[in-house]
Image (spheres, helix red, strand yellow):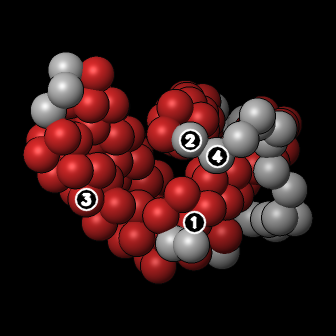
Amino acid sequence: MEELSIYAELIEATSNANKSFIKSEMALNDGNVEDCQKFSRDGQVLMNALIRDTFLEIDELGENDGSVNDYDYPNNFELIKSLNEIIVCVGSILASLDDENVLKIIMPKLYRAINTSKEIYLSLFEN
């Protein structure tokens, strides 16, 4: 099933991007600027791939209305939180692929998390 491979790709890339941004913050907290920058670049590469490819494939699975979740201001922690929400939503989707009612509830949440992640990422790294 093609949908499953798209969801698997989304979980893998989002998890790895999330891990890179977390490692970046941890390195920054430890005062290791070089590792902070390295891990941040790794996360950026993954986010660029997600935006150019996987997020577009997910958009084709449903109706993305462009809405975003509320957040205080763009920062790495908000991005990490939003990427985590994507992973949680995909887990819920995979647990209930045969239940249309659950999918109707979760898909809008997934799109909001994706839109929020894109918005925060672009604000932080593409301006």
Q: Callout 3 environment at 10 Å: few (<14), some (14 to 19), or many (20+)?
A: some
Q: Position of residue 94 (x, y in %)?
A: 52, 37
Which residue is disc 1 drawn over? 122
- Horizontally, residue 121 falls left or right of residue 112, namely left
Q: Quadrant of the C terminus?
A: bottom right
As drawn, the label of residue 74 is 4
Q: CA distance from mark 2 to mark 3?
A: 15 Å
Give the residue pinned by disc 2: 75
Q: Are marks 2 and 4 in contact (CB under 8 Å)?
A: yes
Q: Secondary structure at mark 3?
A: helix
Quick check: marks 3 and 4 in contact, CB under 8 Å? no
Q: Outermost residue toward the bottom?
A: 52
Pointer 3: what residue? 41
Q: Is residue 118 visible?
A: no
For the residues bearing labels 2 and 1, Cβ distance under 8 angstroms: no
Of the 4 image quadrants, the one containing the N terminus is bottom left
Whichever of labels 2 and 3 marks the residue nearer the N terminus, that label is: 3
For image coordinates 86% across by 56% down, the residue present is 67
- Label 1's element? helix
Q: Amino acid at mark 1?
A: Leu
Kindly identify which numbered label has been placed on residue 4. Answer: none
Q: Nearer the viewer, residue 50 or 81?
A: 81
Image quadrant in which you'd find residue 79:
top right
